[in-house]
Image (tube, rainbow, N blue to C red):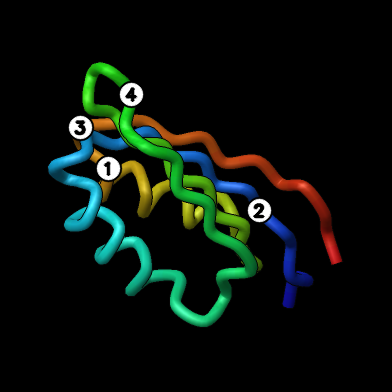
Amino acid sequence: MRGMKTVELEMKLPYREKGTVLSKILQEIRGRIRAVHFLPPDHRGISEVKLEILENDPESLRKKLRKMIKNGGFSLRITAGA
């Protein structure tokens, strides 16, 4: 089995859809979250959320996120491997 990796997930989501999208994502990664940072919406109504999580398989997480996030964007970056 692969070791756990620390992954930084940055998302830009419409303010009105942020709660719905985040609840789906948090159900998927429950128990592996190390840190969460919420930034206020900008002048266009886009909120930024940064999560630091522990993940075995970042590529499968990327595929799941692509299906969940329709009206927004995200980046996934591996910051450390264990």
Q: Tell me which amino acid carries mark 3.
A: Asn
| C-alpha distance separating marks 2 and 1 | 18 Å
Q: Which residue is identified by label 4? A: 42
Q: Which residue is identified by label 3? A: 71
| C-alpha distance separating marks 1 and 4 | 19 Å
* Left or right: where 74 falls relative to 71: right
Task: Residue 18 in the image: state x and y as whole percent.
Answer: 24, 48
Q: Which residue is identified by label 1? A: 69
Q: Tell me which amino acid carries mark 1.
A: Ile
**Front-most of 74 and 36?**
36
Residue at screen point 37% across, 68% down? 26
Task: Residue 68 in the image: state x and y as whole percent.
Answer: 26, 50
**Mark nearer the N terminus (2 vs 1):** 2
Q: Mark 4–mark 2 contact, CB under 8 Å?
A: no
Secondary-structure class at tag 2: strand
Q: Mark 3–mark 2 contact, CB under 8 Å?
A: no
Task: Residue 28 in the image: state x and y as whole percent.
Answer: 37, 70
Q: Which residue is identified by label 2? A: 7
